[in-house]
Amino acid sequence: MSHDDDVRTVHRICPLCEATCNLELRIKGRTIELARGDRDDVYSHGYICPKGSAIGHLESDPDRIRAPRIRDRATNTWRDVEWDEAFAYIDAHLTPLLERSGRDSVAIYAGNPCAHNLAPQVYNRVLIQSVRTKNVFSASTVDQMPKQVSAGYMFGAALSIPIPDVDHTDYLLILGANPFASNGSLMTAPDIPGRLRAIRNRGGKIVVVDPRRSKTATEADEWLAIVPGTDTLFLLAIANVLFAEGLADPGDHLRDHVSGLDTVESLVAPYSPDAVARACGIDASTIYRIARELAAAPSAAVYGRIGTTTTEYGTLASWAVDVVNVLTGNLDRRGGAMFNLPAIGGGNSGGAGGVGRGIKVGRRVSRVANLPEVFGEFPAATLPDEIETPGEGQVRALITIAGNPVLSNPDATRLDRAFASLDFMVSLDIYCNETTRHADVILPPEGLLARGHIDLALRSLGIRNVAHYSPPAVELEAHEYAEWRTLLRLAAIMQGLGSSDDAVDTVDDFVLRGLVERAVGRPGPFEGRDADAVVAELSAGGRRGPERVVDLMLRTGPYADQLNLDALIEHPHGIDLGPLQPRVPDVLRTPSGTIELAPEPIVADVRDRLPELLDERSHSDAGLLLVGRRDLRSNNSWMHNLRVLVKGKPRCTLHIHPDDAQRLGLADGKLARIASTSGSLDVPVEVTDAIRVGVVSIPHGWGHDGPGVELSIAREHAGVNSNVLTRPDLLDPLSGTSALNAIPVEVAAIS
Ligand SMILES: Nc1nc2c(c(=O)[nH]1)N[C@H]1C(S)=C(S)[C@@H](COP(=O)(O)OP(=O)(O)OC[C@H]3O[C@@H](n4cnc5c(=O)[nH]c(N)nc54)[C@H](O)[C@@H]3O)O[C@H]1N2
Ligand SMILES: Nc1nc2c(c(=O)[nH]1)N[C@H]1C(S)=C(S)[C@@H](COP(=O)(O)OP(=O)(O)OC[C@H]3O[C@@H](n4cnc5c(=O)[nH]c(N)nc54)[C@H](O)[C@@H]3O)O[C@H]1N2
Ligand code: SF4
Ligand SMILES: [Mo]
């Protein structure tokens, strides 16, 4: 580590998306002068995208918050403060509130970068437990929660998500994902464009199901322009064909490990291709053909993402994806959909495998809307209800951790108003943006180079088994405070331990102690060892914080014989642990010890709710349906302040098919007014035949021209907040996840 102005090369994993590319950074002191792909990396082999290249601009952005700041409510002005003052201020406001109004009066919202940064990955849980609030919310319920619920029911753990084995598959059916823009999600795969092209180069086939002709669709063999929200019907029709034609066969490797086949057969019986064709907008003959192709391919994988999860039937669609993977014999098989085995271990490794407790949801319900808890959270869509509805347990304070719900959650206008009404708000963030402008205190993290990085959840979603750690490259500067200490200092305040920095180490030691006691008390490499000795060993050389916890995970994980944190430090280009391997039955943690194809809540939802969808989409004219989209140079709501990424033509436009444009009198470049039952927006029109008739698209994460937003470049390219249009009432009931796609809207020209 050096502090001087030497020019050095360091390597670190890019924290900006799920691909986890390794970056080669030329740094001078603390300044990133150049970012390139690391050609020696075992996983990304030099791949980089425009966002990764721009990471130096992100780090040096003059609009970034560098010091803690407190807002004076009377004048609505900010002043920078010392860290001690910031925490004392929080203690002075939150502690009395907790005493007066109870634990549930404080809510927590954790945003997407929590999955990409070490501190929140390890310590968010500690903060949540310290607040002891029921009111926990996160970006998961505007994202992947349906997949976690379906995987939890079918395989027994929330992260037992089958990953398409893209490097070996012969046939990939992609629904509602655009990896050429997103670089892949629930499928950690650096250089996914290259890996997808390789499928076709080796004679394989890619079919993309998407209402838009996305970049991924143009790179595929076939594009199926589905009606938004109907993927479950399409997939069940494929299953229907597989049963009807005697092609449904889980394969020799799975036959003894699957239950519920008969139930699925009867469930899908009404959903023949002919029955769903009109609703899906896809010819019956095409559905028959795709089913037969999937069954006949030497190996095949079905993969669904945002366009399937963030719909009213998100859990059913996620389940149907894996039902088809099982029925075509492709689950847990090379080239099919497989399970990762991450080095840090997880809910489906360790202990005795093959059977478990499965998952439980709905252990409590939300106070106002009676929505069930899912994996410890309530649906993000109901946060405004909890803030605005008086009564015992009303949310009066909020802590946001790396989240921008005002741009990312549904019914944004109401949420924005609700935040303004809070008694107190703390935000951990790098910007003063649409959400954090409402905070009383903003606490910024240390610079990227000053933190260590390792991916935890993302590694269980990899298309290979890889272990990788990036140590800090520079020391903390005097004004900086590590984000892990911020999280634990807040936890200490919530526990009534006061606001001093001393409490951080106490809490950290307590957390580690608990984890060590668990490790020595159960089967594994540390079983039966003396807890004190283990703690001392892990703390050697003064190691503490998240790195010490990660070291424990590695030393008790599935590769404990070869891996610990020091070994990873010695391998700055990562350690490749090989391609995915078959893991059934060991991976299962279901109560039955089988892959449960027909979990009761899913069966009930298919029976009770799905017929409505079929009926509605088959018989009525749905009008226009709104979907989202992503752009390669954008990252949800928070990379729009970098000129290198936002220059060029505006990206926040309304895509509409020429036929619809003509019917409505809309012209390219002119403004249109788009309205849903939640709100309305004026947005520039981009007429394009790369979208299905009857569908319009606006990307999310824009709308940076609000009061108090300190994003000078983003403001010049403000765009509109598409979540003004998304609706709190459109929700997948099994996962609490918002429908952010297939929103009924009306569009009119502005004269
Ligand atoms: N309509 C519509 N809405 C959507 C989606 C959609 O497809 N359509 N997609 C949804 C999805 S998939 C997601 S994941 C959510 C995202 O929803 P959110 O997580 O709520 O929003 P982000 O835009 O990711 O905001 C991330 C925040 O973290 C801050 N940040 C960045 N790096 C750091 C850091 O190192 N430390 C700290 N403390 N803060 C940091 C940024 O400044 C920003 O404020 O949006 C969802 N919303
Ligand atoms: N460049 C960039 N990369 C990102 C992000 C980003 O904002 N920008 N965000 C990151 C995050 S948080 C996530 S979760 C991932 C998401 O990764 P992806 O899931 O790949 O996300 P999108 O690129 O939005 O692709 C979703 C596609 O679904 C289509 N779609 C919409 N509705 C439906 C439907 O009902 N059915 C079907 N079949 N398709 C539909 C849309 O037209 C769109 O093409 O991307 C991550 N990577
Ligand atoms: S693809 Fe994702 S991980 Fe790779 S450089 Fe781009 S943003 Fe970073
Ligand atoms: Mo996401």
Image (cartoon, rainbow, N blue to C red):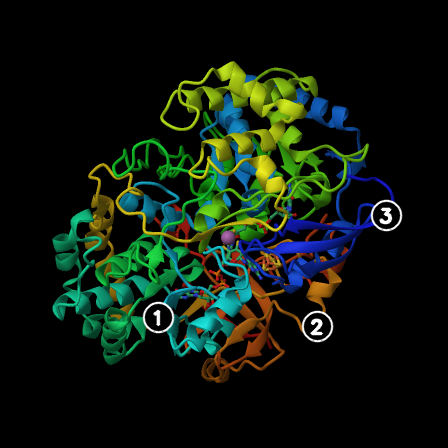
Residue ID for mark 2: 648
Which sits in the foreground, 387 or 319? Answer: 319
Residue 499 position within the rendered picture, expressed as x and y whole percent measured from the top left:
68, 20
Residue found at x 63% / y 78%: 669
Q: CA distance from mark 2 to mark 1?
A: 36 Å
Left or right of residue 453: residue 372: left
Left or right of residue 492: residue 184: left
Kindly indicate the quadrant of the structure image that contains residue 175. Answer: bottom left
Residue ID for mark 3: 6
Q: CA distance from mark 3 to mark 1?
A: 50 Å
Q: Residue furthest front?
A: 561
Q: Quick check: 723 above or below 539? A: below
Label 2: few (<14), some or many (≥20) within 10 Å? few
Kindly indicate the quadrant of the structure image that contains residue 251. Answer: bottom left
Q: Is mark 2 within 8 Å of ligand 2?
A: no
Q: Secondary structure at mark 3?
A: loop
